[in-house]
């Protein structure tokens, strides 16, 4: 039994939370439900492997109105994303260019974060291209960690909901994660979510700027998911991550390309741009996977994409 399955059993999570949520989503937001149902239909096992524990944790944190909160958050994020992408198609550049501006009206705004947090949480399993990143994560990041055997220390820069750390700790025994985020709301909601999993003793939460995070510890693996595009200088984050890792240790990094979310600042247009930044920061690219939503119109100028990288910190110029 995977540790993640044991966590679910010990916390008394009921089965079929996925069906409960999908039924509610179809009832309350039918315009947004089809995409999620299509994702579940095409990848039923992978979808439920991710949705069941995530919905169980959300139910415990939110309470009896968990379906309403997740549905309204998901609908709001999807509407913001669609609106932003339409503007991007017209203007051919992102709306925001200042991190301070974005911070003030997003990460530092509790009202915004209260729905954005849960909306993004749902997209992790609801959007097909995000679900495929999870599959890549399992095969190319988690599998080597499990094969390595010995426990280690994980650093998660820009942890958001904390989901990627929780998915890691639930699959590798004995590991500990230090989770860093600049949003007070995200840190508090992550703390509540972690408490539901029984993994509190294996995590540390730190409210800090991931770009400037420094620690006396040397970490054995790193994660940074969908933060690079929110920064004016994403290289700063990659260098921060590289500085924290031991030589030849691995990291899982994701970012968005030509995708105009509310807080996106840095406009990656080619996958090679992300790879080049990783190499400049001191990493070797071990594996990469780029995917785009199947709902993207063929006539669109931009193809909104997500890319995932598994990186290894170089010990020298080439190794």
Image (spheres, grey):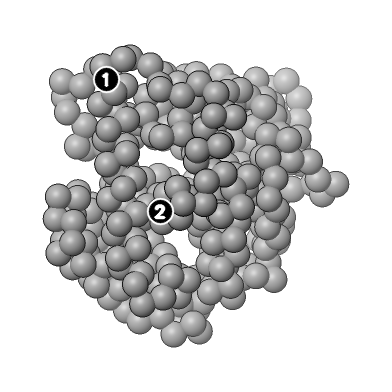
- The mark closer to the camera, 2 or 1, is 2
Specify the quadrant of the image occupied by residue 136.
Answer: top left
Looking at the figure, which quarter contains the C terminus? top right
Residue for point 55% across, 23% down: 98
Looking at the image, which residue sits at the far right? 216
User: How far across and down, in percent of the image, does residue 298 sit?
Assistant: 16, 24
User: How far across and down, in percent of the image, does residue 121 sit?
Assistant: 41, 54
Q: Give whichever of 47, 110 is nearer the camera.
A: 110
Considering only vertical position in the picture, is 126 above or below 249? Answer: below
Question: What kind of element bears circle 1?
Answer: helix
Looking at the image, which residue sits at the far top? 92
Considering only vertical position in the picture, is 231 above or below 47? Answer: above
Q: Is residue 184 visible?
A: yes
Question: What kind of element bears circle 2?
Answer: helix
In the displayed structure image, the side of residue 305 where residue 266 appears, left or right:
right
Give the residue pinned by disc 2: 115
Label number found at residue 89:
1
User: How far across and down, in percent of the image, does residue 236 sit?
Assistant: 67, 27
């Amino acid at each position: 039994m995977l540790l993640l399955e044991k966590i679910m059993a010990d916390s008394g999570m009921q089965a079929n939370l996925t069906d409960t949520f999908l039924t509610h989503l179809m009832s309350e937001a039918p315009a947004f439900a089809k995409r999620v149902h299509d994702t579940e239909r095409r990848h039923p096992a992978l979808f439920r492997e991710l949705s069941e524990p995530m919905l169980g944790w959300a139910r415990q944190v939110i309470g009896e109105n968990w379906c309403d909160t997740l549905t309204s958050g998901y609908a709001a994020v999807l509407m913001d994303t669609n609106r932003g992408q339409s503007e991007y198609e017209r203007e051919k550049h992102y709306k925001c260019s200042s991190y301070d501006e974005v911070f003030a009206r997003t990460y530092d705004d509790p009202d915004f974060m209260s729905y954005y947090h849960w909306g993004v949480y749902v997209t992790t399993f609801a959007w097909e291209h995000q679900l495929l990143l999870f599959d890549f994560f399992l095969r190319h990041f988690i599998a080597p960690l499990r094969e390595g055997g010995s426990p280690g220390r994980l650093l998660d820069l820009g942890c958001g909901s904390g989901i990627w750390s929780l998915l890691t700790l639930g699959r590798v025994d004995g590991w500990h994660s230090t989770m860093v985020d600049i949003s007070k709301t995200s840190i508090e909601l992550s703390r509540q979510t972690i408490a539901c999993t029984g993994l509190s003793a294996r995590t540390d939460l730190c409210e800090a700027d991931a770009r400037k995070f420094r620690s006396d510890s040397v970490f054995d693996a790193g994660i940074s998911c969908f933060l690079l595009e929110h920064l004016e200088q994403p290289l700063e984050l990659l260098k921060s991550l590289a500085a924290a890792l031991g030589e030849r240790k691995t990291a899982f990094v994701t970012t968005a390309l030509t995708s105009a979310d509310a807080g996106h600042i840095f406009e990656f247009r080619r996958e090679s741009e992300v790879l080049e930044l990783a190499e400049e920061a001191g990493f070797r690219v071990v594996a990469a996977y780029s995917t785009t939503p199947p709902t993207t119109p063929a006539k669109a100028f931009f193809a909104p994409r997500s890319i995932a990288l598994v990186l290894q910190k170089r010990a020298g110029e080439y190794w």
